[in-house]
Amino acid sequence: MLSALPIAGGSVACGAAAMAWAVRGRASAVFGPSVWRGPRGRRAIALTFDDGPSEETPHILEILAAHGAAATFFPCGANVERLPVTARAVAEAGHEIGNHGYNHPLCCFRSGRFIEADMARAQQVILEHTGVRPVWYRAPYGVRWFGMRRAQQRLGLKGVMWTVIGYDWNLVAGAVVARMAGRVSSGAILCLHDGRELRTRPDIGTTIEAVRRLVPLLLERGYKLETVSQLLCPTT
């Protein structure tokens, strides 16, 4: 009996590790179709922003416009309702808009009904205020869960994670730029944040400064900054 304990313990540990990968692994599609990078054959990348819009999002738009760079924004529905003009400005600037949930919930241990309702509410709010029906969904905190596959199917959404995340809510701008520039490669999907969950008037100065430095650096390296759809579904 005692000799069996390490095996049992090992099985539990392996099961926990497998579950953790299914929930948070960037390449996991266990809970629904999901991608984390594009093809490596073209020197193109996708810059993405989560948690917006915020009062500071226009600064991000100004930087992108100055360099002719496209991006994909994954706003929270509640923030879109709070700042509809800013949300529309993102769409009018030609950027892609995805779905990041309505209330930015942590979906683990939530019911499938709850997950779908949150996704659907965000989908409706984004469509109402921007005229855009998202086709991409990024789960809040990157956490996928049971019921998400069915919700994505019913709402016509495909999941997208990231190749590199900037930790721009925690690091200084120089560290964010160094982290992302050091890990970027053709087909990469980069994740930053133009908001901080559902906070009003969040301080995203680090993100703004990181984008100000990062965008020209990436362009100088010969990368084309595209939307997620352009990166994953090139027309030429």
Image (tube, rainbow, N blue to C red):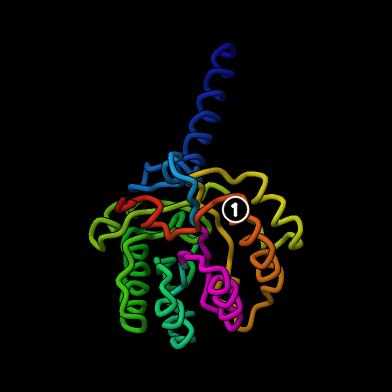
User: Is residue 25 toward the left or the right of residue 202 in the image?
Assistant: left
Query: As rendered, which of 173 and 161 lies closer to the eye?
Result: 173
Query: As rendered, which of 34 and 12 lies closer to the eye?
Result: 34
Q: How many marks?
A: 1
User: Is residue 157 toward the left or the right of residue 164 in the image?
Assistant: left
- Magenta residues span 47-72
Q: Position of residue 70 (x, y in %)?
A: 47, 65
Q: Please give the name of the residue rendered at 48% of the width and 56% of the height, measured from the top-left corner.
A: 46
User: Is residue 96 toward the left or the right of residue 11 in the image?
Assistant: left
Q: Residues within 10 Å of mark 1 (few under 14, many from 20)?
A: some
Query: As rendered, which of 152 and 15 lies closer to the eye?
Result: 152
Q: Please give the name of the residue rendered at 44% of the width and 66% of the height, measured from the top-left corner.
A: 100
In the displayed structure, 176 sits above or below 79; it is above
Q: Please give the name of the residue rendered at 36% of the width and 81% of the height, measured from the top-left corner.
A: 130
Element type where label 1 sits in the image: strand
Q: Position of residue 195 (x, y in %)?
A: 58, 73
Q: Position of residue 123 (x, y in %)?
A: 33, 72
In the displayed structure, 9 sits above or below 229; it is above
Find out whether residue 33 is within the magenta segment.
no
Quadrant holding the N terminus: top right
Query: As rendered, which of 89 and 217 lies closer to the eye?
Result: 217
Q: Amino acid at mark 1?
A: Ile
Q: Please give the name of the residue rendered at 74% of the width and 59% of the height, measured from the top-left corner.
A: 171
Which of the 4 image quadrants contains residue 208?
bottom right
Query: Which residue in the structure is indicated by mark 1?
Result: 165
